Amino acid sequence: QPLRVASEFESDTLKSVIYYTLKGGRFDGELKFSVVRCDENDDDTEPRVMITVTLLVPNKGRSLKTKTGAKMLSLLAESIVVSSITEAKQILSRELQSTIYRGRARERSAEKRHIAFENTKKMEEMAAERRRRWQRKNPGTSGYRPSGHMMRGPGGGPSRSF
């Protein structure tokens, strides 16, 4: 059955789409799909959704048999319910995975910072220990710190030019 969108409406609690039939189809009329969020003021209960599928056939239009129309509408409503549940599960799964990923990334970065801090601390301790040992082995040179000025020439550059 070829259908075309007649109108769409969306608000905070309602989404509605109306399709109408085109020439060459099995029947004449409009299909209206509505999804309404039934929010109750209780924070303890989960929000509920009401899905409505309506078939409108004009008086002088080609109509479906009642049994066929009822079956078609129930199958369409069931399909919308399954699709909505699947999409909601996917959204929740993505949010959960995002939360887990952010938590793991936070833990990894904290661990890396901790390891970097420990390595820096060890290197500083090794440098201090090396300095102490050098000063113990060379008792008269504790105040001597080479500045590098001896290696420079009179112009401030290297002492040798090639």
Image (cartoon, helix red, strand yellow):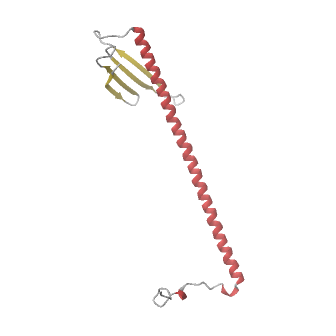
Q: Position of residue 59 (x, y in %)?
A: 29, 9
Is residue 46 toward the left or the right of residue 8 in the image? right
Residue at 70 percent across and 85 percent down: it is 139
**Left or right of residue 18: residue 41:** right
Please name the residue shown 42% across and 20% down the image: 52
Name the quadrant containing residue 115: bottom right
| Rendering coords of residue 19 (x, y %) | 33, 22
Front position in the image: 45 or 159: 159
Quadrant housing residue 126: bottom right
Q: Residue furthest front?
A: 162
15 lies left or right of 44: left
Please name the residue shown 61% across and 66% down the image: 120
Q: Is residue 109 above or below residue 3?
A: below
Residue 47 visible in this rendered orientation of the protein: no
Between 99 and 21, the residue placed more toward the observer is 21
- Image quarter where the N terminus lies is top left
Q: Is residue 86 visible?
A: yes
Left or right: 154 in relation to 54: right
> Which residue appears at 44% of the width and 20% of the height?
77
Residue that lies at the very extreme toward the right in this rendered image:
137
Q: How many marks?
A: 0
Q: Position of residue 32 (x, y in %)?
A: 36, 20
Q: In which quadrant of the rendered view does residue 29 lie?
A: top left
User: Residue lying furthest bottom in this view?
Assistant: 154
